[in-house]
Amino acid sequence: MAEGKILTINMGPHHPATHGVLRLVLELDGETIVKVTPHIGHLHRGIEKIAENMNYQQVIPLTDRFDYTAATLCNEGYCTAVEKLLGIEVPKRAQYIRVIMGELARIMGHHLWIGSHALDIGAMTVVFYTFRDREMIMNMTEEVSGYRLTPSYLRIGGIAQDITPQFIKDLRAFIKWFPTALEGYNTLLTDNIIWRKRTMGIGKISAKDAINYGLTGPSLRGSGVAYDIRKTMPYGCYKDFDFKVPVGDNGDVYDRYLVRMEEFTQSLNIIEQALENLPEGPVNVDNPLISNPDLGAVQEDISALIRRFKIQCQGPEVPSGEIYHSVEGSKGELGFYLVGDGSENPYRMKVRSPCFILVSALEKMMLGHMLADAISVIGSIDIVLGEIDR
Amino acid sequence: MTMDNAKVLEQLKGEFADAIVDDVDFRGDLTVVVSLEKLHDIMLYLHDDKALHYDLLSDVVGIDKMPREPRFEVAYVLHSMDDFRRLLVKVMVPIDVEVPTVTDIWNSANWSEREVYDLMGITFSDHPDMRRLLMWDDFDGHPLRKDFPLKGKDFDKKWDPSTIQVL
Amino acid sequence: MGDKDYVLNISDRRPEGKYITPILKGLAYTLKNFFTKPITIKYPTERREVSDRWRGLHRLKVDDQGKLNCVACGLCAKICPSQAITIVPYEDAGGTRYPKEFVIDELRCIFCGFCQEACPKDAIELTKVYDFVDYQREDFIFDIEKLKNPEKYIFAGK
């Protein structure tokens, strides 16, 4: 190539390292990236528009399809947002089960992240071990909810069904096993010189820039800002648990890797505490306008039958008002802006997707690096296109 | 120094007394409705002021309240990384009126505003790159407007191969 | 920002030096796993047992006399997020309601389980059938007869 000429290449939408259908138009000077233009929208399904035409309960399976690697967290984000609009408090047991399932989903999301991230850079082995352990969590999710990837387990005002003894048995086995597995990932990656060369000093972003570009989650914490919604604006029962928020100093790919690796441990720690202190009691809120009456009552009692018809047809009675509620998703701040107008459908539901903002900051992180480093940067922010395009 | 909703509102009202149209404290979050003319000044103040210092713009939301005038609302979700406060700033926008961009204050507004433009059809003035984001470039209409049908305008139309343009 | 007690700074974990030994350790870890029992199964000759709550193909339950439990109230069709259920009710001479037609488009269905949760008569349930294949799209539109016995559609392999 002649001196000073710019080469434009297309990366994606079918490139395996873009984790879906992200298309990047990269302009290269030699092998150095000088301009990045992300093109998104290939997976746009119009979920926000569809949600406006459904009642509040029917939206729950749609939320599974945002971040399908950690679907329960999206369920949690939506359900807690509606509960905030309703102004109700979920029973303690349901909150604890939500925390357990949510943290399992976070571990599941991080499993996919580290597996595919390492695979993209060239360390193929890790993905087999992470998927082996991801399988255990999927089996547990299946045990309680009936589905593996898109569980739709949470309901407005509680959860679908109580957990089973088999689940608790499996979970204890997982808690016992997982530190060993984590040690294995560490053995394969943390000290490995090839991994370090490919990740250290790549995709640097300072704390000030990271905040200005709207980064959240592990990507922001890697730059040194301890913004974790579970700690800073606690929702549910996260106040009850003792856990740490890992932050890095350098804001490069390696620090984001370390932060997420520590989050495995912290999530496991939360699950352990939640399982030890799991309270007894109901798992659905005791409110005739919100909770679905159980089958026994419906077949005995005419008023319960009427109530079930009303709740299933119209969903819970949600007042008019506007709220913003966010939870800590596995990729960052997953926010829901809900506008209720007193009818059975959400008037407007806007999802603040963490990956959407992360992709807009890709250019900032990639400029000046080599083409091969683009893969590390994409891997390190852990994007899921289902959440970006919605 | 910790700031609560009342203090934030008090300080904001002290600075921009005539620009604060309305304020709502609903479920613990403060929403401030400001006038469109003063929006950029207020946002700049919210970002730069040492005590308020809302340095993270989480989201920009477009809302269509169709029969009402002014028709649109744009809500900004702000967070402060000092003590993790939240503030919602809202502005009423009549149809075909441009909103001043805040991309020069927060870079994260870039894509969020493009998304609002794409799906809701609200244009932001002085935005560096006001193109469609999620829909394709020659798409007709703005899908999240309330008068846009759920199934799309050309849902039943047969696809015409002669419309393909070879670049 | 960094003075909060819950913050854990991990940047001191960045390793320095160490070139060959970590790679050898990694190779040893892989070699050790080479001798463990495989966790994969040979589907479809081997099949794993799914949980009791599994949400697979639908079944319309029948009572002892072979009559459907369903009274065609339409609640499942109302709650279905993907509008996969179509019901045509019918009333016999005795005034009892039955579904004349009960059609589920299994290609539209997302298996969320809301129909089972909504049903006031316990008439519809999701079975453990998770793999069903056929040749035509029309074959996935299940009517009452097909829905009575979904186990017939388990993919048995060659």
Image (spheres, rainbow, N blue to C red):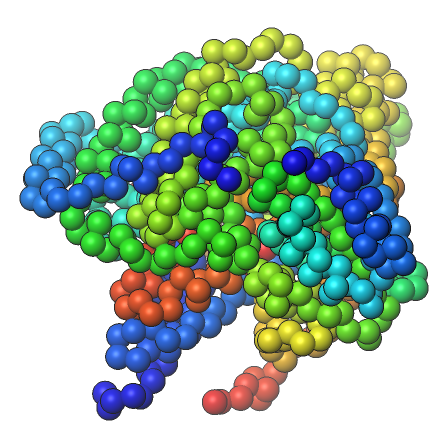
Q: Nearer the viewer, residue A314 or A286?
A: A286
Q: Residue at x 45, y 32 (%)?
A: C7
Q: Residue at x 92, y 64 (%)?
A: B69
- Left or right of C5: which side holds B109? right
Residue A114 drawn above or below residue B129 = above
| Whether residue C64 can be seen here | no
- Left or right of A213: which side holds B33? right
Residue A278 drawn above or below residue B111 = above
* Quadrant for the C terminus of chain C in the image: top left
- Left or right of A54: which side holds A128? left
> Which residue in the rendered view is the most extreme toward the top?
A280
Q: Residue at x 24, y 30 (%)?
A: A183
Q: Nearer the viewer, residue A300 or C32?
A: C32
Residue A3 drawn above or below residue A350 = below
Q: Quadrant of residue A60?
A: top right
Figure label count? 0
Q: Nearer the viewer, residue C131 or A75?
A: A75
Q: Nearer the viewer, residue B164 or A113?
A: A113
Residue B134 at x, y = what percent?
59, 66
Residue A337 at x, y = what percent?
71, 47
Q: Residue at x 36, y 81 (%)?
A: A8
Q: Quadrant of residue B118?
A: bottom right
Residue B135 at x, y = what percent?
61, 70
| Whether residue C3 can be seen here | yes
